[in-house]
Image (cartoon, grey):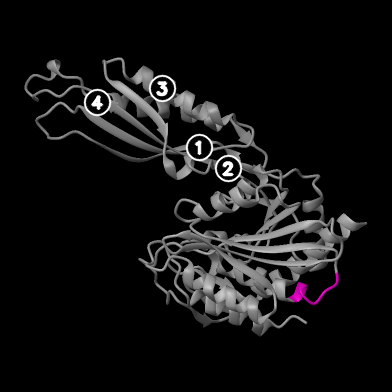
Amino acid sequence: MMSEEGVVDLLKKLVATPSYTGYKNGDREVVDLLLKYFDNNDIEAYMDDLGENQCNIVATIRKGKIKKRKIVLNGHLDTVQLEGMTVKPFGEEKDGYLYGRGTSDMKAGIAAMAYTMTLLKGIDFDGEISFVGVAGEENGDIGIIKFLQKYGRNFDYAVVGEPTNLKAVIAHKGIKWIKVIFEGRSAHGSVPHKGINAIDSAVEFLNIINKDLKPELKRRIHSLLGESTITTGTIKGGTGTNMVADYCEITLDRRFLPNEDRKVVISELERIAEEASKNGSKYNVFEMNQTAVLEHIPFNLEKDSILLEKTKRCLKNLSLDYKESYLPFWTEAASLYSKSTPSIVIGPGDPTLAHASNERVSINEVVSSVGLYKNLCMELLRESNS
């Protein structure tokens, strides 16, 4: 039987345990907490040590037939840093909410999924259900990279517990962080004709993006996600006011749609950089490691998928909003989906409060998510054995 106190107690312990980016012990303390929790509930669990105090945890319940459907409940264990928070970072309950870093993104989802495992332990079914908590999603995605290398396509369905206010998210954009470097030739500011100004090339590059590319991206539309976008993040260059700049670099955040060719994302910027370099500067356009090591592809679950059908049925049975939705940010559901695992993103917490100074989560929503996860797992297992 579900106990509201049980899942809330676990959530409070998770929030009170640091796992923010740059923390000296990484995700290890959270993994230790969860290992003890699963051990106390007689659930098989182990840690994958990734080095430098980064680690994944995998807990699995297997029952019934040898050939069985496999479901993974997935989430990340880390949070962003604590700077700028206006609430107590390690947890404070008030007015039906728990405040603190990671409450919404996404220790609420982690707590609900881990607690759901204890309920599933006492239910008869044919299948295999795994809880997978991964390291480093906020900083390089090392956890999901290592997990996919080890397990690949071993799952039939994946449920990712990122904050969605318990709405069924079936789509989000892909990301490419792109660096563009222009190299010119230095000269004294009194004789600029002897140099090649890399900043001038960068300015022309941005002018072409604003004049030509952005209007084109507005015409690329997805029914849920809207238009494709590009944003200038940083620009730096030059060595002194009285010198012709021989170097300038720009970083760009490019959010692209499921119906866009991801190879074109780079090639169209290369063409613009070439046009901007008519003053003789050299250029280099490349994807940054933050999105290149694990390719941040778009996510788009088919509307006629069994996973979406079952999720909507469970939401409707719980009198929750069952219309499919989307997220503005990237999730690791895209990586699971790329391995031929039908995936959906649904979890407790307000996505607009992820990384916020007053991050919080509704306790009622956390409790509701446990019922949703339990019912969804059973629906998917019944489907597979019918």
Horizontal side of residue 244 vs 79, given as left or right:
left
In this figure, which residue is indicated by the disc labeled 2? 173
Magenta range is 119-124
Q: Tell me which secondary structure the magenta stretch mostly adopts.
A: loop
Horizontal side of residue 60 vs 296, given as left or right:
right
Give percent across and percent down for residue 115. 67, 74
Q: Amino acid at mark 1?
A: Thr
Picture residue at 67% right of the left edge, 59% below the top: 346
Give percent across and percent down for residue 318. 79, 68
Picture residue at 75% right of the left edge, 65% below the top: 320
Query: Real-space Cα distance between discs 2 and 1?
Result: 10 Å
Q: Nearer the viewer, mark 1 or mark 4?
A: 4
SS under mark 1: strand
Q: CB under 8 Å between callouts 2 and 4?
A: no
Q: Amino acid at mark 2?
A: Lys
Q: Residue furthest right?
A: 386
Query: Real-space Cα distance between discs 3 and 1?
Result: 16 Å
Work out whether residue 316 or residue 128 is closer to the camera in this orientation and state it: 128
The earlier-in-sequence mark between 3 and 1 is: 1
How many C-alpha atoms fall within 10 Å of the one at disc 2: few (<14), some, or many (≥20)? many
In this figure, which residue is indicated by the disc labeled 4? 198
Query: Real-space Cα distance between discs 2 and 4?
Result: 32 Å
In this figure, which residue is indicated by the disc labeled 3? 272
Quarter occupied by the N terminus: bottom right
Query: Real-space Cα distance between discs 3 and 2?
Result: 23 Å
In this figure, which residue is indicated by the disc labeled 1? 229
Query: Real-space Cα distance between discs 1 and 4?
Result: 25 Å
